[in-house]
Image: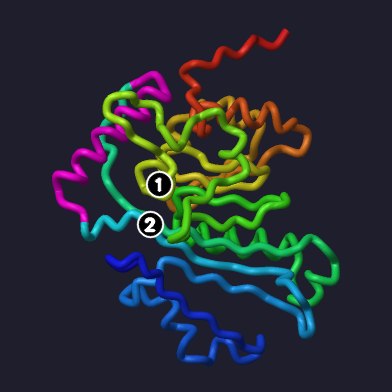
Amino acid sequence: MTENFYVGKMKKTWPNASVLEDKAWGKLFDYANEYQSAVVEFVRAGGEFPIAGMGLNYSLRDGRNASKEAMDYDEQVMALTLGKMRGRKFAGVTHGDTLHVYNWIINHNECFQYLETSVDDMKEKMDAFAAECSPLQAWHGQYTWIPVFDHADGYESTIYEDMSVLNFFRGILLEPPYGLQDRRMTAQWCENVLRMVTPHMWLCGNLVEQLDKTALERVAIVSEIKGSYKIEKRRDCAMDDFELALLPILPIENSRITVLPTI
């Protein structure tokens, strides 16, 4: 967005067979071009709406233009925010931006056949990407939600965050006012707060360290690869029990929650 509030956009249509050969494809992902979002949608010939898509989002908050004083202040207040959420002190919360990569498809056989893929294939591709790139967090799930995050015209939530009673607009600190909706795509948030819960996930080491590993392994199969952890809910485990094991990192003020013991 320019100082005059202009948001530049580029849109182009290609046939599937030639999309990777076009010079414009590489420019979409060139960081020097400063595109905040790159969105790809697959539309069948004669179709009216996309049946699948993928994309890349950068954080809207641009740390390259922020002063050291502003970044130091942001780190301090984020540490206070996380401390209030979790009921303990947080140290070493450093400023940083994130990249969000996603893909989606309508859960119908014809859509999978058209793109020559499957649910298992999508999981395998995500696992290969996560094992190579060591994400802060990653998830595969089935729900009526296209995982598009922050754009220049607004800050988007996950469907899990939409159900949280945490007030992202106001935040949880009264002095100073510190909203959270524009900070959920920062590194300090994503390495400390899980934005979505699905039966198939990847978590960074900092998130896993905040969990009771024994409780987690009772409800999930945990595999460590290059410092990242693949988390797969056990089939005989209920989602409620899975969520309880993840409670210390959920997007809520868990310091105010009391869980009754199982009888």
Residue pictured at 46% horizontal, 18% vertical: 255
Residue occupied by mark 2: 60
In the visual, does 107 lie left or right of 223? right
| Residues at marks 2 and 1 touching, judged by CB atoms closer than 8 Å | yes
| Residue appearing at x 60%, y 14% in the figure | 259
Q: Secondary structure at mark 2?
A: loop
**Callout 2: few (<14), some (14-19), or many (20+) C-alpha neighbours within 10 Å?**
many
Whole-percent x, y for residue 143 in the image: 72, 49
Q: Is 197 situated left or right of 61 in this image?
A: right
From where the camera sits, is residue 230 visible?
Answer: no
Q: How many marks?
A: 2
Query: Between residues 148 and 114, which one lies in front from this camera angle?
Result: 148
Residue 207 relative to residue 77: left or right: right
**Secondary structure that dominates the magenta span:** helix
Which numbered circle lies on residue 12?
Answer: none
Q: Which mark is residue 182?
A: 1
Identity of the residue drawn at 27% across and 33% down: 77
Q: Is residue 216 visible?
A: yes
Horizontally, residue 57 falls left or right of residue 235, namely: left
Q: Earlier in the sequence, mark 2 or mark 1?
A: 2
The quadrant where residue 12 appears: bottom right
Residue at far right of view: 109
- Quarter of the image with the N terminus is bottom left
Which range of residues does the magenta coloring cover?
A: 66-88
The disc labelled 1 sits on which kind of residue? Asp
